[in-house]
Amino acid sequence: MTTLGLSADALLSTTRAVRRRLDFERPVDDDLIRECLEFAVQAPTGSNQQGWRFLVVTDPDKKAALADLYRRGWDVYAGMSASAGALAVGAEGERASQQLRVLRSASYLAENMHRVPAMLIPCLHGRIEKAPGMGASSMLASIIPSTWNFMLAARERGLGTCWTTIHLMFEEEAAAVLDIPYADVSQIALITIGHTLGTDFRPATRESASTVTSWNTWTG
């Protein structure tokens, strides 16, 4: 498979949440997804236990059913104080503009979720909300790096991805669509997958790491 040949630094700084630039008309070959998954399973794991499970969804009816759940959740999310639109209120300058761009692109994805060529559902055995103490963090410590590996591999191969969680508002219904045993398996996210319209992604506007980093003592 032809890759973009990005440097490690370029790959890490330009793997964006792709929404408006997904090519809904171009299918994604199953073997390309399998290739990216081979990098997912190379991620580091807690206690060297590879408890991850991945469910790839390409069936049009199942994608449509998940998209319906996502849009139901989007209607709820859009009114939350943590939504991109709400966070734009009171923001200034470029930060406000950025939040509004995120809102528009997220709304676009919600409207077109059923058109996404493929979806990836990373899963874990067990109900994560029932994990005691540090259990939930320990469970996520393996599935998140592995899924991010998948997303990095996808970027290098000209695919765009976006980590979403809104469908989890209706996780049990999604489990029924996908024949996932809800009582025994937790869905962690829904990753959209598609070829991108162009590959010229740039680093995002972010605060300097120094503004969010403390050394030895918490400084808020």
Image: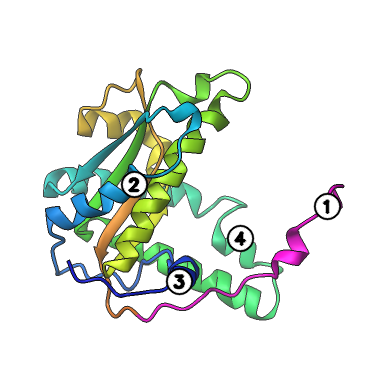
Going from the N terminus, do you reach mark 1 or mark 2 first?
A: 2
- In the picture, the disc for residue 14 is 3
Query: What's the residue at 13%, 53% (across, down)?
Result: 30
- Residue stretch in magenta: 200-220
Q: Residues within 10 Å of mark 3 (few under 14, many from 20)?
A: some
- In the picture, the disc for residue 86 is 4
Going from the N terminus, do you reach mark 4 or mark 2 first?
A: 2
Query: What's the residue at 12%, 59% (across, down)?
Result: 29
Residue type at the position of mark 2:
Ala
Q: Nearer the viewer, residue 83 or 122?
A: 122
- In the picture, the disc for residue 82 is none
Q: Residues within 10 Å of mark 2 (few under 14, many from 20)?
A: many
Q: CA distance from mark 1 to mark 3?
A: 28 Å
Q: Which residue is mark 2?
A: 40
Q: Are marks 4 and 1 in contact (CB under 8 Å)?
A: no
Q: Is residue 111 visible?
A: yes
Q: In x, y percent, where is residue 118?
A: 21, 54
Classify mark 4: helix, strand or loop.
Answer: helix
Q: Nearer the viewer, residue 150 or 80?
A: 150
Q: In x, y percent, where is residue 41?
A: 33, 42
Residue type at the position of mark 1:
Gly
Q: Nearer the viewer, mark 1 or mark 3?
A: 3
Classify mark 2: helix, strand or loop.
Answer: helix
Classify mark 3: helix, strand or loop.
Answer: helix
Q: Which residue is mark 1?
A: 220
Q: Is residue 119 above or below residue 14?
A: above
